[in-house]
């Protein structure tokens, strides 16, 4: 027989689950918005909101043995395997990411076309602030950690400096672009949208999203799924075995990635005041997010 105390505990647990689900959904909205912006990474948002390691661990921990069990007709074993998947994370987070991408693609495209310098100034502020937030999370910063910072800086700085490759929009290229872009998206500092821009697929995929071109979207998404399932295992290993080194490398990536928004700001700026205000706002909002969600 349930007691009053048992009922209170159950209600408290339900409220906690509901609140956590809502918060994870909100983080998904932020990540999805970031993922379609050239210059800022969804991985950066995951990092500053305190969900990055859980996300990488949950993705890399998915075991596909349940497919083999289903094919054999062993439903019990399949269900036991499926239950280990972190659906409490994936469902609300994935829903937020997908919803944000669908809703924000038109808005982001409009802002980048019409208020380019102000938009990229905001991105510049968020990226720089994210690097500061990640640095503050490190308990100690040894001199030896300067090497991965410099390495990460050079990788991102050189990568975003490449000119756009004139790659055609075939289904195979979309598939490969999905693999490459998602690997960048889960790395704080490297923007998956910027990689798509480099591969000449960014505007094409925005157009596909706006016009709901299901074939192109499915092919790209399949590549992204394969990429994230594979690459997440590498990131998980690095965070487990070489966490300090990896985090410092990610800081370097974020700083080096500032080259992209800086180039856009300098090339399109009409007035310095709105650009400065936008940059400061972007810088401040990351600290607000980190304070609200980063714990």
Image: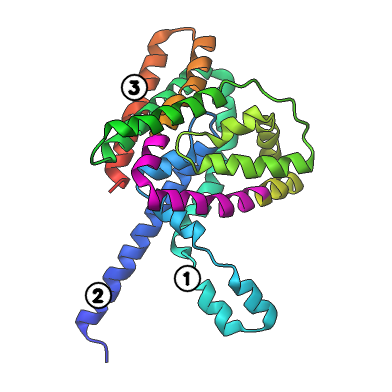
Other residues around mark 1 within 10 Å, as few (<14) / some (14–19) / many (≥20): few
Alpha carbons under labels 3 and 1: distance apart: 43 Å
Q: Is residue 248 magenta?
A: yes
Q: Is residue 61 magenta?
A: no
Q: Residue at x 48, y 41 (%)?
A: 187
Colour style of the rendered protein structure: rainbow
Q: Residue at x 25, y 75 (%)?
A: 9
Which residue is disc 3 drawn over? Answer: 280
Other residues around mark 3 within 10 Å, as few (<14) / some (14–19) / many (≥20): some
Which residue is disc 2 drawn over? Answer: 9
Q: Residue at x 40, y 14 (%)?
A: 274
Please state the total of marks drawn on the protein image. 3
Span colored in magenta: 223-249
Closer to the camera in the image, 281 or 232 = 232
Magenta span main SS: helix
Q: Of callouts 2 and 3, which one flags the residue occurring earlier in the amino acid sequence?
A: 2
Could you tell whether 76 is left or right of 262 in the image? Answer: right
SS assignment at label 1: loop
Closer to the camera in the image, 285 or 5 = 285
Q: Quadrant of residue 288?
A: top left
Q: Looking at this rendering, what residue extends furthest in the bottom direction?
A: 1
Q: Position of residue 137 (x, y in %)?
A: 28, 41
Q: Quadrant of residue 143?
A: top left
In this rendering, the answer to whether 88 lies above or below 283 is: below
In this rendering, the answer to whether 256 lies above or below 208 is: above
Q: Nearer the viewer, mark 3 or mark 1?
A: 1
SS assignment at label 3: helix
Closer to the camera in the image, 200 or 93 = 200
The reply to whether residue 212 is visible in this rendering is no
Residue 84 is marked as 1
């Amino acid at each position: 027989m349930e007691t009053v105390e048992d009922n209170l505990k159950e209600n408290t647990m339900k409220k906690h689950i509901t609140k956590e689900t809502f918060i994870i959904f909100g983080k998904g909205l932020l990540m999805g918005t970031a993922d379609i912006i050239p210059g800022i990474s969804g991985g950066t948002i995951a990092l500053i909101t305190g969900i990055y390691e859980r996300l990488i661990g949950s993705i890399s921990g998915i075991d596909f043995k349940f497919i083999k069990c289903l094919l054999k007709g062993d439903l019990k074993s399949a269900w036991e395997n499926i239950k280990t998947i972190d659906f409490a994370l994936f469902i609300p987070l994935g829903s937020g990411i997908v919803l944000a991408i669908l809703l924000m693609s038109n808005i982001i495209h409009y802002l980048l076309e019409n208020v380019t310098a102000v938009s990229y100034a905001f991105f510049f502020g968020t990226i720089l602030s994210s690097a500061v937030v990640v640095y503050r999370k490190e308990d100690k910063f040894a001199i030896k950690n300067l090497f991965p910072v410099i390495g990460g800086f050079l990788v991102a700085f050189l990568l975003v400096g490449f000119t756009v490759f004139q790659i055609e929009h075939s289904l195979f290229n979309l598939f490969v672009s999905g693999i490459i872009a998602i690997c960048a998206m889960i790395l704080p500092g490297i923007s998956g949208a910027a990689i798509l821009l480099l591969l000449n697929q960014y505007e094409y995929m925005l157009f596909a999203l706006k016009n709901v071109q299901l074939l192109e979207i499915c092919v790209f998404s399949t590549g992204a799924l394969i990429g994230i399932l594979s690459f997440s295992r590498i990131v998980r290993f690095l965070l487990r075995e070489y966490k300090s080194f990896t985090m410092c490398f990610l800081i370097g990536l974020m700083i080096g990635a500032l080259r992209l928004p800086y180039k856009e700001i300098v090339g399109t700026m009409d007035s310095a005041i709105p650009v400065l205000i936008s940059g400061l706002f972007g810088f401040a909002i990351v600290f607000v997010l980190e304070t609200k969600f980063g714990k």
